[in-house]
């Protein structure tokens, strides 16, 4: 201790009485040198190797620097620095499983079928390699991204613009509900990326003329997001519009085709067996946890047995429970009419509610979704147009007011909560005729639902005491408002009304 203090005091410069600065003493006094001080150096001394242990006749090192795998990052996937900086600005710093598998293969020029559960960043998995390829050889139109719903198209549009902002990537949105003439001018201006729904794009191909669509004949990438919905046959199929869109695109040997979905259906996998153009590598198929983890791992699945005639009462009680009173909620219905009725009824019951379904104008759909994202409305009543792809991190509860007819639709619905490792809850209201549908869902998901319960409280008792009379009255009042052509605020809608025959 004394040697250290004497060394530190002798190592400092001092002033004598005349004000002349003395020279610093560089060597200690005496023959015995003080012990060396601890210093920080970038060159570490070589330490003795830790002992190794023998297991089953093989040598296994216990050195953690050897056993730990290399930290995965976007730079290890050969992503350009400007894209890494853009992703970091969006708080995306580590690739997910689907991104780790697909990005290198897409950069190699392979067609891709990517399947991964909801909330795992599939948009980044195809946007990043496309923008990197574009930056190497900029041209327009470089990529076409097709999605089944307008809301998902808007979300992808915003994400691609954010990722490509550093290189001023020009992105246009072609969806229904907007001015078609203005969209035609945007298409003719040769943007870099086009994001579209198949119906509106097919309409442009049929009516807008060659000057508008000629840029589509030279695209390098074609992306089908939510490919299972785009390729579903039967009633309401998008296949006819999709075939019209493909008719003006380059042949498969002149472009890369990428398909991404949360549920890999037989229609999607059938594309793998189609004959390949000469010289093109085989399709890269990547399914990350689609079988064992079809739903988010931190999702709690619950159900409530509710008579069909009193489902609205059970819903009101569920929304008013103390644990759900402050949660952001999405309520899914099978039909537009049901969603409209629930919106009016819940508004009359003093819930902060908005709606999202195909019966609304595009401006109303955009504004209502923005209100819900900003938490100006706590509850969003929606049909399956909101089930796919929408990323709203604050959603803590998903309620299936109507049981979906397709188990895959259930997966997409409950995937709106518990996204990106967060915790979430789903509650399904089950009627007398829904048991077989629930069994099909449980078989597809691979896990069973648990019965919803509150500690020390009877749900049926709360319904009878608190909800039966007020909900029945407000439901009747909501039906009257809809019949009279009033909006959710009770005002009569302005505009021309269809005359009844």
Image: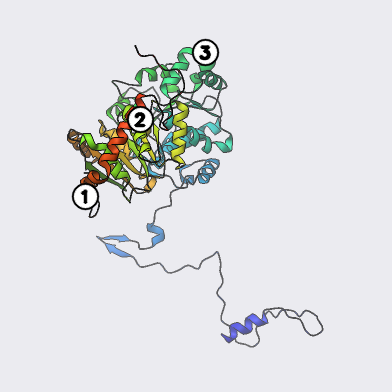
Is 21 on the left or on the right of 249, as rendered? right
CA gap, disc 1 and disc 3: 66 Å
Percent across and percent down for residue 241 are 39, 18
User: At 31% across and 61% down in the image, what residue appears?
Assistant: 59
Q: Residues within 10 Å of mark 1 (few under 14, many from 20)?
A: few
> Image quadrant for the C terminus?
top left
Q: Say whether disc 1 or disc 3 marks the residue closer to the N-terminus.
A: 3
Report, in whole angstroms, how far the alpha carbon at label 2 lies from the one at label 3: 41 Å
Name the residue carrying label 3: 210
Mark 3 and mark 1 in contact (Cβ < 8 Å)? no
Q: Is residue 444 visible?
A: no
The answer to which quarter of the image holds residue 66 is bottom left
Report the disc number at residue 458: 1
Tell me the quarter of the picture where residue 308 sits. top left
Q: Position of residue 56 (x, y in %)?
A: 24, 60
Q: Quadrant of the N terminus?
A: bottom right
């Amino acid at each position: 201790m004394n040697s250290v203090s004497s060394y530190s005091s002798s190592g400092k410069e001092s002033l004598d009485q005349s004000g002349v600065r003395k020279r610093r003493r560089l060597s200690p006094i005496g023959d015995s040198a003080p012990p060396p001080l601890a210093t920080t150096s970038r060159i570490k001394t070589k330490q003795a190797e830790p002992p190794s242990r023998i297991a089953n006749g093989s040598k296994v090192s216990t050195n953690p620097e050897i056993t730990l795998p290399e930290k995965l990052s976007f730079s290890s996937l050969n992503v350009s620095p400007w894209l890494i900086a853009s992703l970091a600005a969006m708080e995306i710093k580590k690739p997910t499983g689907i991104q780790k598998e697909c990005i290198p293969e897409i950069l190699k020029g392979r067609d891709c079928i990517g399947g991964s559960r909801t909330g795992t960043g599939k948009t980044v998995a195809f946007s990043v390699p496309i923008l990197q390829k574009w930056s190497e050889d900029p041209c327009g139109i470089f990529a076409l991204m097709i999605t089944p719903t307008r809301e998902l198209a808007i979300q992808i549009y915003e994400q691609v613009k954010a990722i490509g902002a550093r290189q001023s990537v020009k992105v246009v949105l072609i969806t229904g509900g907007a001015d078609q003439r203005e969209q035609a001018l945007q298409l003719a201006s040769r943007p870099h990326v086009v994001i579209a729904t198949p119906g509106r794009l097919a309409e442009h191909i049929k009516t807008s003329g060659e000057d508008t669509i000629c840029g589509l004949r030279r695209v390098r990438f074609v992306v089908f997001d939510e490919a299972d919905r785009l390729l579903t046959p039967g009633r309401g199929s998008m296949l006819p519009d999709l075939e019209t869109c493909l008719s003006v695109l380059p042949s498969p040997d002149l472009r890369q085709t990428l398909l991404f979905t949360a549920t890999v259906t037989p229609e999607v996998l059938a594309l793998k067996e189609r004959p390949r153009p000469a010289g093109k590598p085989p399709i890269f198929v990547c399914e990350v946890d689609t079988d064992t983890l079809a739903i988010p791992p931190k999702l709690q699945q619950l159900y409530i047995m509710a008579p069909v005639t009193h489902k609205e009462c059970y819903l009101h009680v569920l929304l008013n429970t103390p644990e759900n009173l402050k949660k952001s909620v999405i309520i899914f219905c099978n039909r537009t009419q049901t969603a409209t009725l629930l919106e009016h009824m819940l508004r009359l019951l003093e819930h902060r509610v908005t709606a999202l379904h195909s019966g609304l104008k595009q401006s109303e759909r955009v504004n209502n979704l923005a209100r819900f994202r900003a938490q100006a409305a706590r509850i969003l009543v929606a049909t399956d147009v909101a089930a796919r792809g929408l990323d709203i991190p604050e959603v803590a509860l998903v309620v299936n007011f109507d049981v979906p007819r397709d188990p895959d639709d259930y997966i997409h619905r409950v995937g709106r909560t518990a996204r990106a490792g967060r915790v979430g809850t789903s509650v399904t209201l089950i009627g007398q005729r829904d048991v077989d549908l629930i069994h099909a869902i449980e078989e597809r998901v691979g896990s069973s639902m648990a019965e919803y319960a509150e500690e020390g409280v009877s749900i049926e008792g709360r319904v009878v005491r608190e909800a039966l009379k007020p909900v029945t009255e407000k439901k009747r009042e909501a039906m009257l408002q809809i019949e009279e052509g009033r909006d959710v605020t009770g005002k009569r809608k302005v505009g021309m009304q269809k005359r009844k025959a």
